[in-house]
Amino acid sequence: MVVWTDKERAAISDIFSKLDYDDVGQKCLSRCLIVYPWTQRYFGAFGNLYNAEAIMNNPMIAKHGTTVMQSLERALKNMDDIRNTYAELSVLHSEKLRVDPGNFRLLSDCLTIVIAAKMGTAFTPEYQASLQKFLSVVVSALGRQYH
Ligand code: HNI
């Protein structure tokens, strides 16, 4: 089981309390699809992903970005049991969507970059460490079905 210090819990809660899910979700998912173009293959039903501008203006991508952020909030609210919280989501991504689990890390790195850019100097190394730990647990839980 993952052990969280009070400082880590406080840092992660503080980061998420400052986030606008619609904005951050859209930015991190778009960034992932632009920087790692092979991730676009899973979103074939999302319409125009022709270039960076199209991706950034695609309303389905924006909406899905918000969905991902809301899902992360579930992990935040269940920090002591992220594994079970994401059990069904892991099955969905592996068995139905067939998303390569390496992509989870790529999206979480994009999220870190977007959050860092938003928070500026408030994103201290301690905050980054707490966020990376949280996202690593999320990535591991989502990948559980693949192990
Ligand atoms: Ni992901 C659907 C959460 C990473 C491709 N994804 C979901 C849903 C949630 C979700 C929630 C909606 C489930 C439902 O409808 O019941 N995805 C997450 C989270 C992460 C993640 C928390 C990582 C932090 N997903 C990824 C990655 C990819 C991905 C990295 C591909 C590169 N996800 C999908 C696709 C769908 C999806 C594709 C279905 C979208 C749709 O609406 O058709």
Image (tube, helix red, strand yellow):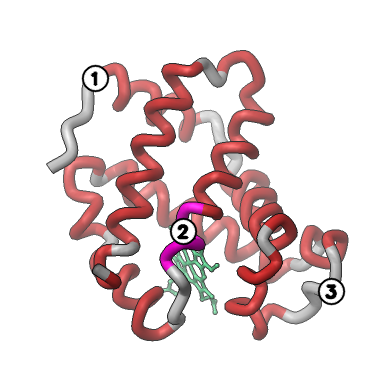
Residue 6 badge: 1
Q: Residue at x 44, y 80 (%)?
A: 98
Identify residue for label 2.
104
- Magenta stretch mostly in which secondary structure? helix
Dot 3, crowdedness within 10 Å: few (<14), some or many (≥20)? few
Q: Residue at x 42, y 35 (%)?
A: 132
Give whichever of discs 2 and 1 has the lower sequence position: 1
**Closer to the observer: label 2 or label 1?**
2
**Closer to the observer: label 1 or label 3?**
3
Percent of width and height locating residue 105: 47, 53
Give whichever of discs 1 and 3 has the lower sequence position: 1
Percent of width and height locating residue 33: 68, 62
In three-dimensional space, the C-alpha distance between marks 1 and 3, rounded to whole angstroms, equals 45 Å
Give whichever of discs 2 and 3 has the lower sequence position: 3
Image: magenta residue range: 101-105
Q: Quadrant of residue 54?
A: bottom right
Q: Residue at x 24, y 19 (%)?
A: 6
The answer to whether mark 2 and mark 1 are in CB contact below 8 A is: no
Percent of width and height locating residue 42: 58, 78
Determine if the C-beta at disc 1 is less than 8 A from ligand 1: no
The amino acid pointed to by label 1 is Asp
Identify residue for label 3.
50
Secondary structure at badge 3 equals loop
Dot 2, crowdedness within 10 Å: few (<14), some or many (≥20)? some
Was residue 104 drawn as part of the magenta stretch in this picture?
yes
Secondary structure at badge 1 equals helix
Dot 1, crowdedness within 10 Å: few (<14), some or many (≥20)? few
Q: Residue at x 45, y 22 (%)?
A: 127
The amino acid pointed to by label 2 is Phe
